[in-house]
Image (cartoon, grey):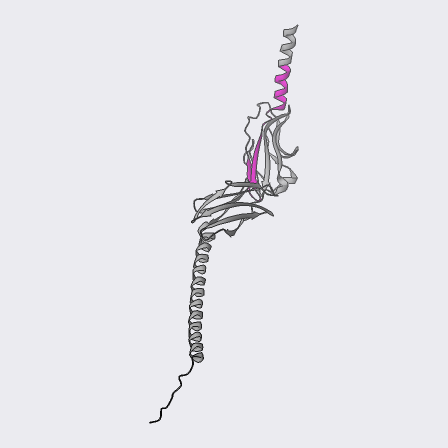
Amino acid sequence: MAQILTLLFHLFLIYTLQIQGSSAVTDVFVKTGDDLILNLTAEIPSDAIIWSWKFTNEAIVTFINGSKSTVQKSHIGRVDVLDEKSNVKLKNLQKSDSGIYTATVVVPTAKTLTQYNVTVQDPVSPADLTFTCAFISSSSYNLTETCRADDSSISTTLRCENEICNQEGGERRSVTKSSSSLHIYKLKESIVCNHSNQVSKIESIENIETHCIELAKKRNITIINITRIILAAILVVVFILTVVIRQCKRKTKPEEVMYEFPE
């Protein structure tokens, strides 16, 4: 009796799997305005009479064995049938086209053949990379880099000594409000900010030397020039004071009295 029940259970399991077909869903990301080809990755059963591609459980293309395919009215002009058996092309996809696309046998037995989870995304916006310098001494400073995109920002700081800069805490990553990714890091002598999602990537790259290092050089030159000006001014003042003091001494020195003696 137990063997019979076990056999019946296995037969029921096999039947259930045949009805359900493949449950694996393939994630696909598409840039807004691009096309996408839906390939049937499973074989169509030999006894299939009607099968179709569905979007959120509504047929967009229907295939009938021995007849031409039919594109549903809602998708005329938006779907191309690449062959009369299985594959189709979705054209000019928009965000509203995101969702589950399923190839399924309808008659004689419902069976899922292939599933795609399609996400349509806009390309990312450019990243704005800005710098702030905080000088500790003439040869030491902190350089803070901030990358902004999609009303989000991410920052990192470099500790620089004698024109050698090291990133404190390593590279940084963040997710923006639109679910894109911001990544900021030091690459050799540059700072890189990467703004990306699954369909596009934009990098903003700035050389460190063009910011704090160059600014430090200008700052040192400015300090030297100011020092020279101050020294020159001091020398002029000292010279003027010396002249004035000498003049005052001459005026306050007693005049020599000339005496005449009778012959």
Q: Is residue 27 magenta?
A: yes
Q: Nearer the viewer, residue 165 or 93?
A: 165
Q: Looking at this view, name the residue that lies furthest to the bottom.
A: 263
Residue 91, position as x, y percentages in the image: 57, 41
Q: State whether residue 94 is above or below residue 86.
A: below
Residue 152, position as x, y percentages in the image: 59, 46
Residue at 48% in and 50% down: 141
Q: State whether residue 229 is above or below residue 89.
A: below
Q: Quadrant of residue 34?
A: top right
Q: In the image, which residues are magenta?
A: 11-37
- Residue 119 at least partly seen: yes
The tally of labels here is: 0
Quadrant of the image containing the C terminus: bottom left
Residue 143, position as x, y percentages in the image: 50, 49
Residue at 64% in and 8% down: 4
Q: Looking at this view, name the residue that lies furthest to the top.
A: 1
Q: Nearer the viewer, residue 249 or 57?
A: 249
Q: Quadrant of residue 44?
A: top right
Q: Looking at this view, name the residue that lies furthest to the left.
A: 263
Quadrant of the image containing the N terminus: top right
Q: Is residue 21 magenta?
A: yes
Q: Nearer the viewer, residue 199 or 141?
A: 141
Q: Nearer the viewer, residue 143 or 65?
A: 143
Q: Quadrant of residue 256?
A: bottom left
- Residue 61 at least partly seen: no
Residue at 49% in and 46% down: 158
Residue 122, position as x, y percentages in the image: 58, 44
